[in-house]
Amino acid sequence: MWTVPKPNYRSGLCADEEIAVNIGGVRVVLFGDVLKRYPESRLAELVDCSTQNSDVIYSLCDDFDPSRKEFYFDRDPDAFKCIIDVYYFGEIHIKRGICPICFIKEMEFWKIDQSVLDECCKSYLGEKEEELKEIANKVKVILEDMDVDQCVTRTQRCQRFLWKLMEKPDSSLPARIIAIASFLSILVSAVVMCIGTIPELQVLDDDGKLVEHPTLEAIETACMLWFTAEFVLRLASSPNKLRFVLSFMNIIDFMAIMPFYVVLSLTYLGTSSMMELMNAQQAVQALRIMRIARIFKLARHSSGLQTLTYALKRSLKELGLLLMYMGVGIFVFSALAYTMEQSHPETLFRSIPQSFWWAIITMTTVGYGDIYPKTTLGKCNAAVSFLCGVIAIALPIHPIINNFVVFYNKQKVLETAAKHEVELMELKSGRQVRKKSNEKEEAATF
């Protein structure tokens, strides 16, 4: 039996309608009529069973002192202070410093329904549950990477090894080399695409038209062959091919590869009748322009770009407000500029829709100067418009940056937590193995 410390709330023996509970060394005296407000809770059951046999009592608490009617619980006293609030106020707030997941377990022990949690605590709990799911997913990925040698067949082992080689740069030195080679191929392909548009580096074809230099085309072909081989190997080794195909980044990879083979088929595979169509050349040019999609492949090799993408997704509300502010400002100031500039004989504001362009470049402080006001009122309107534009752009910047920082730090914490969880699992498994080996040695000794 525990040593009962000096009572914190009330001292002395309890009356018939009172019970005393000792929570981790903290003694609390509670009224029975208050506890019966939640008759299905553990404390209410203690009030009803205080005169019953000891078997029922010990099924509800850890220990019991009949002389003092004091029930002992080996639980967190800080969490219990929050649990008591439900009997007096009808709701519970999770105090700062208490793990919300552990607090939910405390509520389950005391048989308090989660519906009594305040809305702010429910949202906070939801965030923590999402974090736990993310940690569990990261742990699952780490364990899958560690279980390569445990695959049943040789084909499965090869598939898992190839998947790690193509998708996990940190798994081995060859995987890191492949990731660096893929990254350099993307950069080279993007540079070649840009250099190929310089007229001085282009050559004339049989029809007298400027086309890309053969050397640049050879480099482009080599890069596309690398992208194709990489995509095919990743698809072949993917453990879930449907998820792989529907992934946004894999769709980008496919869109970056597809135009090369379409143009190749239109140009070299005997489709001369198709090339004679009026819009065939325009279609080929459009497909060539789609090569810019390969620059988005960099996001697959950059955790920073991925974090930025997720942060922007979380900031859609702020971005929507920014677009709304800018849209309202553009409409108002373009209409005012058109009205004020009509008195000038050489006005550049021919219509309100035409004035939208002026409002956009003014509110974003670009100011190309192709359209500008010439009247005094028009200049005053322009000054107010770019001041409002600066304010409208600056207002949502801080929440967006804050979302990025919070998400980035959160991902770092979750990765560290997942690694620690894996280390604990390995430590526990090692202890179990050693325990079993010791038991076998003892059995062999006897």
Image: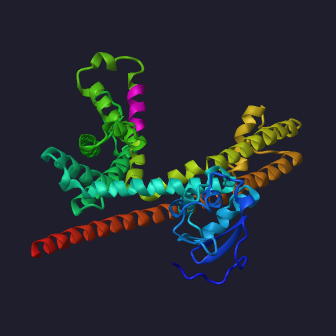
Report whether 159 appears left or right of 92: left
Residue 382 painted magenta = no
Query: For the point 68% across and 61% down, which residue is it?
Result: 93
Query: For the point 72% across and 76% down, which residue is it?
Result: 9
In the rendered image, residue 212, in percent from the top left (x then y), is placed at 32, 40
The answer to which image quadrant residue 31 occupies is bottom right
Residue 284 painted magenta = yes
Query: Which quadrant is home to the C terminus?
Result: bottom left
In the rendered image, residue 98, in percent from the top left (x then y), is placed at 59, 68
Between 422 and 238, the one lying in front of the other is: 422
Image height of 359 relative to 73, above or below: above
Between 288 and 397, the one lying in front of the other is: 397
Instruction: Residue 328: tell me if it is visible.
Output: yes
Magenta span main SS: helix
Instruction: Residue 292: tell me if it is visible.
Output: no
Report whether 132 appears left or right of 153: right
Image height of 208 relative to 194, above or below: above
In the rendered image, residue 70, in percent from the top left (x then y), is placed at 62, 72
In the rendered image, residue 239, in percent from the top left (x then y), is placed at 28, 43
Report whether 191 appears left or right of 19: left
Q: How is the image coloured?
A: rainbow
Between 140 and 367, the one lying in front of the other is: 140
- Tell how many labels: 0
Highlighted magenta segment, given as a residue range: 282-291
